[in-house]
Amino acid sequence: MARTIRGRNNGLEIWPGYVDALSTLLMVTIFVLLVFVLAEAFLSVSLSGRNKTITALRSEIAQLSHVLALQKSKTASLQDELASMASLMKAAKTREAALMAANAALTAKTATLGAAVTAAGGKLAGQVKLNAQELQTVSLLNQQIAALRLQLATIAAALDAAQKKDQEEHVQIADLGQRLNEALARKVQSLEQYRSEFFGVLRKALADQKDIKVVGDRFVFESAVLFPSDSARLSAKGKAEIAKVAQAIEAIAPKIPDKINWVLSVTGYADKEAITGGPYKDNFDLSAARALSVLHLLIADGVPKNRVVAAGFGADHPIATGNTPQDLAQNRRIEFRLTSAD
């Protein structure tokens, strides 16, 4: 009987241990659940932040797509403009080629007329007196050569302008050379009759001078007629010859209408031999100084200041290409030309 009671007491003593174990298990379970709940909350917050980031990235991608579309549109527009500019440049080059062809044709015609004038001059040089028909022929040839030279200069200017416009503005050039030539030709024709009369007066005044001749549309004085060697001071004989030029201008000037803006061009040239001493450092300075000496004397002899201009070209533009003393003497010269100031 005593053993039975002892055994039951042992069973009651074990029960509190089971209760403690179950309590501990429950608390662990609750803790684990709490950890899972907190982890889920943190994960939810993290996912929410990532969703916002993804939304922002999608917005940026949409904006970049829009910008890319605009850039593609601008690129297509620029390509169209480039194609249009290329077409304009091609048309400008075609017209430029036409102007150059016209320039070449006028140059050939000028050479032909120059040869005709030279032949006529050689024929007339052997005669003591010129009849009226021969004078008229020479005058006509001079007029034609002067007009052609002006046309050549105009075409050259037109070509320069065409190239500049083509490079800077890509604009079309439409018959520019022809229009400029016509305008300048009309302006110069009004001066031709007075230039011919000026030549006639000078021919009579300088008929006995072998070192003075007509070349194209200008009178050419060899420097030996006017100046001592390597000097820009006019000799007594030179002053007398320049006085004849001034008298010819005074005779013809009142006949030229006021609407014609004319000038007497005085141009100095030198030979290619280097200057070894004196006040001038090179042939350019010497040729310019001689042209200015002639200009000042013309003004002193009565030619208005606004009707005379001077320039020096040194050894450039020789009229004789040889190296003989005669060739060098021809290249040392002063040229007079009655021309338009416009």
Image (spheres, rainbow, N blue to C red):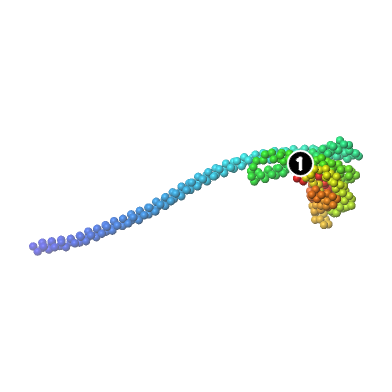
Outermost residue to the left: 1
Q: Which residue is mark 1?
A: 187
Left or right: where does residue 27 sit relative to residue 101? left
Identify the residue at horizontal 46%, vertical 50% (top origin).
Answer: 60
Quarter in which the N terminus is drawn: bottom left
Quarter of the figure that contains the C terminus: top right
Expressed as whole percent of the image width and height from the top left, the position of residue 94 reads 67, 39
Q: Is residue 93 visible?
A: no
- Name the quadrant containing residue 75: top right
The image shows residue 223 at horizontal and vertical percentages of 85, 49
**Residue 47 pos. (x, y %):** 37, 52
What residue appears at the point 59 percent right and 41 percent down from the top-left corner? 83
Q: How many marks?
A: 1
Dot 1 falls on a residue whose secondary structure is helix
- Whether residue 66 can be seen here: yes
* Residue 50, placed above or below residue 83: below
- Answer above or below: position of 125 versus 49: above
Identified by mark 1, the residue type is: Lys
User: Which residue is found at the position 84% from the left and 53% from the top?
Assistant: 232
Residue 107, quarter of the rendered image:
top right
Instruction: Please give left or right for residue 212 compared with residue 68 in the image.
Output: right
Q: Residue furthest top?
A: 133
- Front residue of this view, candidates 325 and 94: 94
Quadrant hosting residue 138: top right
On screen, residue 202 versus residue 45, left or right, reads right
